[in-house]
Amino acid sequence: MIKIIKKYIRKTLETFGIEVRIKPKFSKVMNYDDIYRSKILSDKPTIIDVGANKGQSIDRFCRIFKLPEIFAFEPNPEVFKVALDKYKNFKNIRFNNQGIAKNDCIIPLNVTINTGNSSFHGLRKDSEWMKIRSKQFNTTPDNYITETVEVKCTSLDKYCELNKIENIDILKIDTQGYEDEVLSGATHLIKNKKIKFIEVEIMFDEVYTKTMSFFDIEDKLMNNYKLYGIDYQGFKNLSEGYMFAVDALYIRK
């Protein structure tokens, strides 16, 4: 009888698009935060947050660790001011109003109405993502980008050398399609395995003028890192929704 009831409930949920999966008893459900807690024993890990926006990931890291040393980068001047004011009393957090790239350069940043979508790449105005997003923010695809600002950039290798950062526990990259360029500027750190974990967003849909792939990321990791986990951002394939993206977690070998 119990099996029949479970089957009925499962079928009912599936009619509403809810998939039910039974996990093996021996499986352990862990998110990235749990992994960091189990693998990073220090209360004061060194964390680099590239694409910090208003500090969403900083808040998260501060919940995981007691006193993390965080070096955050946010290229949007207006968003940077908001984040800087928010963390002005935190001595363990250093905010940088600059971008991270392959080398020292000045790049135009396309600032969007939803600042979290701002990118060094252009946006595809005819994409399904753009149609939905522009409606959500009561604007049009043509007006979703509000302005373009010139941003000074440096490489992670150079920044770490200048600031005497020898080892990094977590490198988090969320740069809206520019992740491979960020990794290109961390060749020394990657080659010498100075980073323990690399958490990177990969967007597979044609949201921006450049489409990402796992190869774009792993080609930069020089066989010194291996994929450790994948966290889907809602949709699991290109046909299911308007944006297919994952947060991939890599660990040094």
Image (cartoon, rainbow, N blue to C red):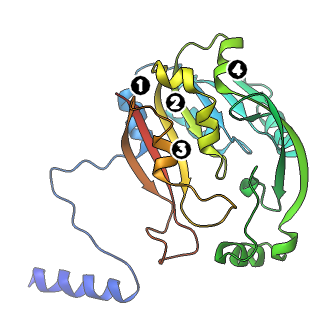
| Image quadrant containing the C terminus | top left
Residue 2, picture quadrant: bottom left
The kind of residue on which mark 2 rests is Ile
Q: Earlier in the sequence, mark 2 or mark 1?
A: 1
Residue displayed at 84% across by 75% down: 139
Q: Are marks 2 and 3 in contact (CB under 8 Å)?
A: no
**C-alpha span from label 4 to label 3:** 19 Å
Q: Secondary structure at mark 4?
A: helix
Q: Local crowd at mark 3 within 10 Å, few (<14), some, or many (≥20)?
A: many
Q: Are marks 2 and 1 in contact (CB under 8 Å)?
A: yes
Question: In x, y percent, where is residue 93?
Answer: 70, 25
The residue beneath circle 2 is 170
Q: Of marks 2 and 4, which one's residue comes earlier in the chain?
A: 4
| Eye-nearest disc, 4 or 1 | 4
The residue carrying mark 3 is 200
| Chain-order first, disc 4 or disc 3 | 4
- Foreground label between 3 and 1: 3
Spot occupied by residue 177 in the image (x, y as percentages of width and height): 64, 52
As drawn, the label of residue 159 is 4
Q: Position of residue 215 (x, y in %)?
A: 46, 48
Q: Secondary structure at mark 1?
A: loop
Kindly report which numbered mark, 2 or 1, lies closer to the viewer in this rendering: 2
Q: Are marks 4 and 3 in contact (CB under 8 Å)?
A: no
| Badge count | 4
Q: Nearer the viewer, residue 33 or 104?
A: 104
Query: Separation of disc 2 and disc 3 at Cα?
Result: 10 Å
Q: Which residue is mark 1?
A: 40
- Name the amino acid type tagged 3: Val
> In the visual, does 197 lie left or right of 117?
left
